Image (spheres, grey):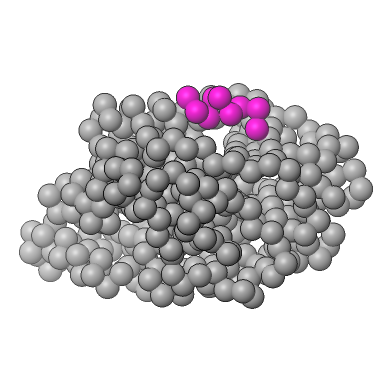
Amino acid sequence: MHRMFEIFIRALIIISGLSISGIGLFALYLTCMEYKPQPAEQLPIIGKSTEMPLYQKEFTFFTWNIGYGGLGSAMDFFYEGGKRVRPEKKEFESYFNGIVHQLKESDSIDFVFLQEVDILAKRSYHVNEVTVIADTLKNHCCLFGKNYDSRFIPIPLTDPIGRVIAGLAVYSRYRPENAQRIGYKITFPWPKRLFFLKRCFLVLHYKLDDGKSLVIINTHNSTFDKEGILRKSERVLLQHYMMTEYEKGNYVIAGGDWNNNPRDFIPSSVLTGDQVKVIDPPIESTFLPGWPFISDPAIPTNRDVDTPYQQGDTKTTVIDFFVVSPNVELLYVKARNNHFAYTDHNPVIMKIRLK
């Protein structure tokens, strides 16, 4: 993190032509335009959907970090030890079209959780991915919450990332009673926070026939967090929210990209012939004790992007999974092995029953 901050400062100096006044004006502009979300914000519901059938007890879920369509199997990424900033336009189109095609094949799934979805970014050629996917999943309503809104990211100096607006999206076959963006605590001081994600989770509530609610959560937790301090802080807030809902008698399901292994992760369980690494520190035992962690142990869901993907050489792990309250029964879970063709993550599909 400190190294990244030094690069930002050097970039500001170069972009401003070594002018102190130029640096000041540039910093002032970024500060005035800083994205400042509230701790909790209502999400607009976009598109068609049906009312939740009050009698329904079984539901399907899908979670996938689509890497903004820019991190397919041939890509590496400069910030994680690679050389490239973004794919060529034809590469991006190939990756993103593959993502859209696979989502179309999954249009019968009740709830689709996506992370790293761009709506305006140089890195994804200014494609509004939220609306393209919404047009694909025509029977789902769309809920989008930003976690990244930076006017200009000035690295690398030779080809800056530039403008980025991105976030999490939920595509739901049923219209929620309520939907919110809940922000994780922002820990970076000025001016670091001008360039970093404002992480969050999305919460949707659905009324059931017994007066209880189904509460679903899409989360994308911190990375580049060697000591695990940020992720632990995020889990404290998430646990409080989930436990509060469960204590009301509600059914709670959280899924997404946790940037941590699920509890009791065993690397030798991966059966694809990939190298497997463990993310340290592990999730603490005090996080939702007794709640099932649901993943497919046989298929990795994430790869390193220091080099293009090469099975057997590239390090992989499992960080995409679900955590459900004790009153939820697992019927089925399966990761889909795409060999990281379209993004640096593989999707996970789950079916559950409300007890």
Q: Residue at x 53, y 72 (%)?
A: 233
* Residue 273 or residue 338, whichever sits in front: 273
Note whether 81 is above or below 135 in the view shown.
below
Spot the residue most to the left: 18
Residue interval drawn in magenta? 101-109
Residue 90 at least partly seen: yes
* Residue 242 or residue 41, whichever sits in front: 242
Q: Residue 174: percent from the left, percent from the top?
A: 72, 35
Spot the residue most to the right: 210
Task: Say if the magenta span includes residue 83.
Answer: no
Q: Tell whether 256 sits left or right of 151.
A: right
Q: Tell whether 285 sits left or right of 308.
A: right
* Residue 210 or residue 314, whichever sits in front: 314
Q: Residue 272: percent from the left, percent from the top?
A: 44, 44
Q: Tell whether 103 sits left or right of 158.
A: right
Location of the N terminus (image quadrant): bottom left
Picture mark count: 0
Note whether 293 is above or below 308 in the view shown.
below
Q: Residue at x 67, y 68 (%)?
A: 288
Task: Say if the magenta span includes residue 103.
Answer: yes
* Residue 100 or residue 335, whichever sits in front: 335
Note whether 88 is above or below 297 in the view shown.
above
Q: Residue at x 20, y 45 (%)?
A: 84
Q: Residue 108: percent from the left, percent from the top?
A: 65, 27
Q: Tell whether 240 sits left or right of 28.
A: right
Residue 185 at least partly seen: no
Q: Residue 333: percent from the left, percent from the top?
A: 64, 43
Tell me where residue 343 sits by quadrant.
top left
